[in-house]
């Protein structure tokens, strides 16, 4: 699509970074910063994730002898039809082993189905939240491995 400039030469609309994230074009919204975009595009290694998780756990659980939680549940989500450009199954399996066998957390891998994925994912997460009577003594971790983007209303959306 092109428009005419004041000099009469056509101006071609270029694909902008905001188009990639489906951001609204209204002037009353704040566009993402370059740091935001870099953070969304950054895929960390499993080792970096583990180190960050460990540091966060140390900050939350300063008592090294005993956790404040009586039970920890982990729900790991990935797409049933894995993107060959982002094969997360190896990452998921390794992290599953850490959660399950190193930390002894109750851990489940759930593959997001291709059909009716939105409703079924929402239901799975709602069911997960209710595990253990939704006790305050229970920690619930949801880990998603896959692509994501910003929707038109600037909410993060999981994508294949």
Image: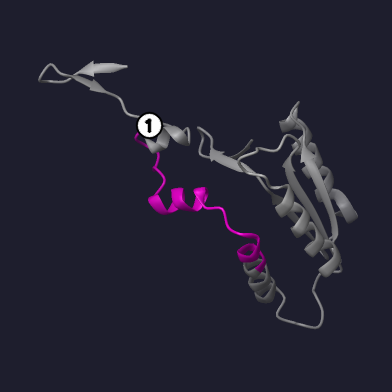
x and y percentages locating residue 91 in the rendered image: 71, 54
| Quadrant of the image occupied by residue 56 | bottom right
Q: Residue at x 50, y 48 (%)?
A: 41
In the picture shown, does residue 11 fall above or below 132? Answer: above
Q: Nearer the viewer, residue 19 or 24?
A: 19
In the picture shown, does residue 136 fall above or below 40? Answer: below
107 left or right, relative to 117: right
Residue 23 seen anywhere in this rendered image of the structure: no
Q: Residue furthest right?
A: 132
Q: Residue furthest left?
A: 7
Q: Nearer the viewer, residue 38 or 128?
A: 38
Considering the numbered disc 1 on the image, is that residue within a helix, a strand or a loop?
loop
| Quadrant of the image occupied by residue 29 | top left
Image quadrant occupied by the C terminus: top right
Give the residue pinned by disc 1.
Answer: 26
Q: Residues within 10 Å of mark 1 (few under 14, many from 20)?
A: few
Image quadrant occupied by the N terminus: top left
Residue 83 seen anywhere in this rendered image of the structure: yes
In the picture shown, does residue 120 fall above or below 130? Answer: above
142 left or right, relative to 84: right
Residue 44 on the magenta segment: yes
121 left or right, relative to 40: right
x and y percentages locating residue 39 in the rendered image: 49, 53
Residue 20 on the magenta segment: no
Q: Which range is magenta?
A: 25-50
Q: Residue at x 67, y 66 (%)?
A: 50
| Quadrant of the image occupied by residue 94 | bottom right
x and y percentages locating residue 80 in the rendered image: 76, 36
Count of number-bearing discs: 1
x and y percentages locating residue 40 in the rendered image: 51, 49
């Amino acid at each position: 699509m092109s428009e005419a400039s004041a000099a009469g030469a056509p101006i071609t609309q270029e694909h902008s970074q905001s188009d990639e994230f489906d951001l609204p074009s209204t002037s009353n919204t704040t566009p993402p910063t370059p740091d935001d975009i870099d953070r969304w595009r950054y895929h960390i290694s499993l080792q970096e994730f583990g180190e960050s998780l460990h540091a966060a756990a140390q900050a939350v659980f300063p008592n090294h002898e005993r956790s404040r939680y009586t039970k920890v549940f982990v729900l790991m989500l990935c797409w049933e039809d894995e993107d060959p450009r982002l094969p997360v199954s190896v990452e998921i399996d390794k992290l599953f082993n850490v959660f399950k066998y190193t930390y002894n957390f109750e851990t489940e891998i759930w593959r997001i189905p291709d059909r009716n994925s939105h409703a079924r994912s929402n239901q799975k997460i709602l069911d997960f939240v209710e595990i253990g009577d939704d006790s305050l003594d229970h920690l619930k971790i949801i880990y998603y491995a896959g692509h994501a983007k910003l929707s038109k209303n600037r909410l993060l959306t999981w994508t294949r």
